Amino acid sequence: MKTVLITGATGFIGTHLVPALHQQGWQITAAVRNNYSRLPSTPIKTVQVGEIDGKTNWTEALAGGVEKVIHLAARAHIIEDNAPSPEAEFLRVNTEGTANLVKQSIKAGVKHFVFVSSIGAMATSSDRILNEKSPCQPDTPYGWSKLKAELELTNLARDSNMTWTIIRPTLVYGPGNPGNMERLVKLVKSGLPLPFGNTNNRRSLVFVGNLVDAIAICLIHPQARKQIFLVSDGQDISTPNLVRQIARQMHRPCRLLPVSPSLLKFLGKLGDAVQEITHKKIPLNTPTVNRLLGSLFVESSYIQTTLNWHPPFTIDRGLQETIGSQTS
């Protein structure tokens, strides 16, 4: 019997992954912190594990002969981060929490561990195309915590019988997605002019359906063992073209103002100053501007050639499903 433990089962990716694997015949144990409401209506075993860190007890979740683990749970980017030390919190949850789960998985006899990391473990912006051999130069506390978690996994599993796969997805979007894509869709829907007419960048995205499909094949394909894969839709897009596609899908006019990127960067710095004074996050700051103006594109052909896998959804189809879920 195919048995798998999924952490972060109530999160954005998890709520898409659980029904997909259930349909494929997997016996699923869903590890949740304390929120059951977002679990899909499928007959799965649910275990409440509480906070995830270096002290989490995974005994019950790993019981019953769990063969595979998919580790999705993480502390992600938080707009209003009130933690005394956000950097320490990222390490506590993402790095120490992952290392603890890896140790207990090895002890429980888990055969394969799929860790969904992030492209942030490499960079959040780059003018050069990234692939699996590119150097890792994370530029955020979140990215560093993910890279350190990857290293913990590979080091701890080295002398064990447990194999692993690390997946670094680009920005994930889809029905129910939080974060930047959701905000961009709302902005386009509002009809407000957006200041990206002079933006010339390249971004790689991944539709959640494509990511789920990639995770599923990494569970079973023998060539996925001890591999790191970058996963994207395989189609790069600029911020202006993304706005145009969203507007077309929503049957809304596309209003792009030809604002100088240097002016936007200046406004981002003003936002930083306001944050420093008020101690509150605002929508327009340097990280937000950099994500909208900067490039981050990847070469994701390695997973395709290694596992004979191809993204089942185009970016047009992914945006159609994403926008349909937010406007219905």
Image (tube, rainbow, N blue to C red):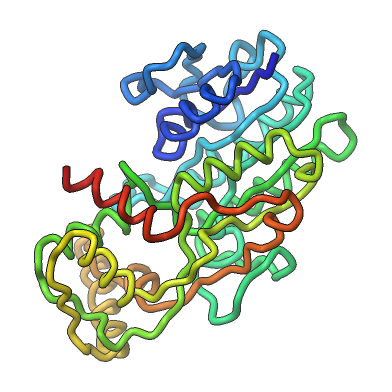
- Determine the image quadrant of residue 225: top right
**Residue closest to the eye, 238 or 113:** 238
Which residue is found at the position 33% from the left and 68% from the top?
Answer: 288
131 up-or-down from 74: above or below: below
Relative side of 108 to 24, left or right:
right
On the image, the x and y values in percent for residue 279 come to 24, 59
Relative side of 85 to 276, left or right:
right
Which residue is found at the position 69% from the left and 55% from the top?
Answer: 303
Quarter of the image with the C terminus in it: top left
Quarter of the image with the N terminus in it: top right
178 up-or-down from 319: above or below: above
- Determine the image quadrant of residue 267: bottom left
Which residue is found at the position 38% from the left and 85% from the top?
Answer: 200
On the image, the x and y values in percent for residue 325 come to 25, 43
Which residue is found at the position 66% from the left and 66% from the top?
Answer: 136
Relative side of 186 to 29, left or right:
left
Which residue is the extreme one toward the left?
Answer: 191
106 up-or-down from 98: above or below: above
Whether residue 279 is visible: no
- Determine the image quadrant of residue 36: top left
On the image, the x and y values in percent for residue 44 come to 49, 13
**Residue closest to the eye, 309 or 303:** 309
Whether residue 20 is visible: yes
Label tally: 0
Which residue is the extreme one toward the right?
Answer: 159
On the image, the x and y values in percent for residue 306 come to 76, 54
